Image (tube, helix red, strand yellow):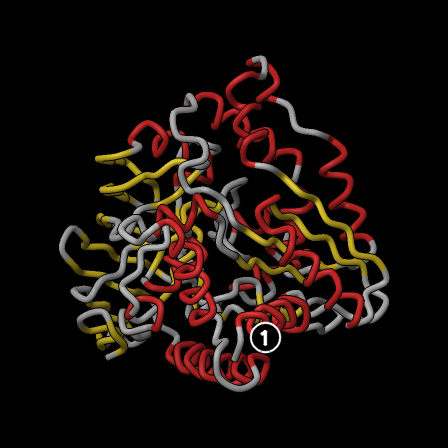
Amino acid sequence: MTFQEKLAQFAELAVKVGANVQKGQTLLINTTTDTVEFTRLVVKKAYEAGAARVTVNFSDGVTDRAFFDNAPEDEFEKYPRWIAEQRDELIERQGALLWIDAADPDLLTGVPVSKLSAHQKAAGKALENYRDAVMNDKIAWSIIAIPSKAWAKKVFPNLPEEEQVEALWDAIFKTVHIGEGSAVENWSEHLVKLHARADQLNAKRYTKLHYTAPGTDLTVELPEKHIWQTGSSKTPQNTEFVANMPTEEVFTLPAKYGVNGYVSNTKPLVFQGNIIDQFKLTFEDGVIVKAEAGEGHDLLQEMIRADEGSKYIGEIALVPHESPISASNILYYNTLFDENASNHIAVGAAYPTCFEGGSELSEEELEANGINVSITHEDFMVGSGEMDIDGVLPDGTIEPIFRKGNWA
């Protein structure tokens, strides 16, 4: 299969499986100037699929950095209303949203934490309606990523510069099951396997999970009505979409006040264009009571102080250490990929869809049911080949779920 054929399959995947664009639907694409050629291909595929209108928002890393370096301080506490209104209209029209990421992991290194924090809070408040739609699967949405020179250099610093982008392309194609046969059919088979694993966990009705590994001893209680899900979801119109491509996870939500112990990260977290690494979080009755980091310590503190809910966790996800992405031994410095190579946890908002009837509940009702609400949702990786996870059944029986990083 030629490179161009692989590109065409990837574009088709993004349209037909990721966002699953329907006839007569509006598609909004958010991306960067590093993706222009590929984005044009996606736009063409979307119209071929029957899209009525495709709108592309291009951002640029250089101008984004210029904003943080030069804008007046009070501007970081504001957020353009037209961006929120554009997404609100997309939701009203039952459109689909696609993110094509190619960001530089070090884009905002050196920007004062105060600016990053103010900007995050302003965006979080302005985009409440959008966040609600995404967290509750009210619209089809998907995130994919393609190489940029800066990102490829970060991932493959030891390769000659002229080989870095090609190496990252090859790695990404493998993660999204492109290379042999029909990528759309490959994904259909992949999702069946993930659904089977989620069904297996849902049948167990575990009341708690206990994680142990070097630097980790964490107990997570699960709500009685918790639901294990995969990366495949459905809108109210019964349109199936895949939010993350690649995806190797099954995930659910914890009981907000039922998390105790400590957990350490096993891969760097790229947050707000900066890296946070070598960190450890300690929990008491759900809340983070201590957070330490060898790199990005101040930014970690701001991340867990974005609002009241950012001091709690909203997601636990299981990914075997033997997953294809993990087996590649590539550190992507991109959560989309790294979270699918490792068990991970998210601080911040829980997905209401992981609770029976959760999508019909107000924020107050979610909180009353012990489901975390927040303006943030940040995944960080905790899995390794040394992690064991035990599940506690309703009758108190303890059984192994993971041993040495893989399904028991």
The answer to which of 300 and 307 lies nearer the viewer is: 300
Relative height, residue 64 to residue 58 (above, below): above
Q: Is residue 62 left or right of residue 211?
A: right
Is label 1 in a helix, a strand or a loop? helix
Residue 3, horizontal then vertical, whole percent: 53, 70
The answer to which of 37 and 349 lies nearer the viewer is: 37
Relative height, residue 64 to residue 285 (above, below): above
Q: Residue at x 26, y 34 (%)?
A: 295
Relative height, residue 60 to residue 133 (above, below): above
Question: The residue under label 1 is which amino acid type?
Answer: Glu
Q: Residue at x 73, y 53 (%)?
A: 28
Give the residue at mark 1.
5
Residue 64, horizontal then vertical, whole percent: 57, 31
Residue 381, horizontal then vertical, whole percent: 32, 54
When asked about the image quadrant of residue 63, the answer is top right
Q: Is residue 100 left or right of residue 387?
A: right
- Judge the density around disc 1: few (<14), some (14-19), many (≥20) Cα neighbours within 10 Å: few
The answer to which of 272 and 88 lies nearer the viewer is: 272
When asked about the image quadrant of residue 212, the answer is bottom left
- Quadrant in which the C terminus is drawn: bottom left
**Can I make out residue 54 in this image?**
yes
Q: Residue at x 55, y 16 (%)?
A: 70
Residue 280, horizontal then vertical, whole percent: 23, 42
Q: Is residue 395 left or right of residue 200?
A: left
